[in-house]
Amino acid sequence: MRFLIAAAAIPMIAFASPAAAGDPAAGQRVFNQCRACHQVGEDARHTVGPQLNGMFGRQAGEVEGYNFSAAFDDIDKVWDEENFAEYIRNPREVTPGTRMVFAGLRNDQQIADLTAYLMQFNEDGTTD
């Protein structure tokens, strides 16, 4: 009986949304790795990298006032939880030629937590 219950739970785990499993408070701690180059919040501005307010649902490589590397010129991608998770694991492999020097996150829980944290920020930097 235990085997059947465990087997039934596997598909639910496999299809769980990363943000649904993510903890925004833990994601804020993960974001500390990103702070050297990125900002979020009402006073966020571009630094080495673009500000990340309202990132999910936005076209990759398009933020007013930020000059992206040529690696983003031909990318037709709208950021969502799935492609962000793939990207943040290894940005240089996913987008060859990017100026982003971050080696990537390999821990699934950290990625889910970071996603949950970033999803809180609207385009104007406010949170819901």
Image: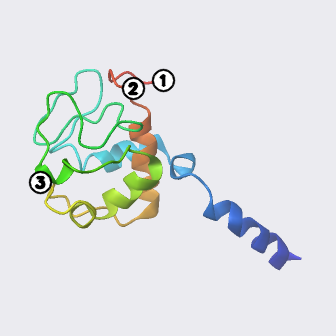
Q: Amino acid at mark 2?
A: Asn
For label 3, the SS is loop
Answer whether residue 26 is visible to the viewer in this image.
no
Q: Which residue is mark 1?
A: 128
Q: Position of residue 66 (x, y in %)?
A: 14, 34
- Who is closer to the viewer here, 103 or 81? 81
Q: Which residue is mark 2?
A: 122
User: Image check: 77 left or right of 14?
Assistant: left
Q: Which residue is mark 3?
A: 99
- Who is closer to the viewer here, 63 or 119? 63
Q: Earlier in the sequence, mark 1 or mark 3?
A: 3
Q: Amino acid at mark 3?
A: Arg
Q: Position of residue 50 (x, y in %)?
A: 19, 37
Instruction: Decide: few, some or many residues near mark 3? Use Cα within 10 Å; few <14, some 14-19, many ≥20.
Output: some
Q: Amino acid at mark 1?
A: Asp
How far apart are the two marked residues, 1 and 3, measured between alpha carbons? 31 Å
